[in-house]
Each structure stands twice: as C-alpha cells, then as structure tokens.
Image (cartoon, rainbow, N blue to C red):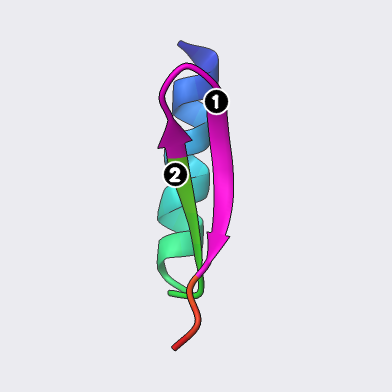
Amino acid sequence: RTIDMHINRLRHKLNSSGTWKIKTVYGKGYKFEVLLI
C-alpha cells in the first residue's frame, strides 16, 4: 500500500537521527515518539 511505503521511507530517514520513532498503533494508525537519551 502507498501509506506503508511512505511510513517505511520516513522510518529509514528518521532512524538515522536516532531521536524520533514512528510506532504502529494497532487499530488506530501511527504515532511519533521522541526518544530522550
């Protein structure tokens, strides 16, 4: 699906920074999480 491809690309781009994460929420959608280190 198109949304899956966009989320996958965003995850790869955000994964390089290490401070943001996109989580899948079952039955709801997606949410951003900020990782505080």
Q: Residue lying at the far bottom in this picture: please name it.
A: 37
Mark 2, residues whose alpha carbon is within 10 Å: few (<14), some, or many (≥20)?
Answer: few
> Residue 21 location in percent, x, y?
47, 58
Mark 1, residues whose alpha carbon is within 10 Å: few (<14), some, or many (≥20)?
Answer: few
Is the residue 4 above or below the residue 2 in the image? below
Q: Amino acid at mark 1?
A: Gly
User: What secondary structure is marked by label 1?
Assistant: strand
Residue on which disc 2 sits: 23
Q: Residue at x 44, y 89 (%)?
A: 37
Q: Amino acid at mark 2?
A: Lys
Depth order, front residue of 13/20: 20
Residues shaded magenta? 24-34
Confirm whether the magenta stretch covers residue 28.
yes
User: What secondary structure is marked by label 2?
Assistant: strand
Is the residue 19 above or below the residue 10 in the image? below
Q: Is residue 18 left or right of residue 6?
A: left
Is the residue 25 above or below the residue 2 in the image? below
How far is disc 2 from disc 1 in space, using C-alphas?
9 Å
The numbered dot on residue 29 is 1
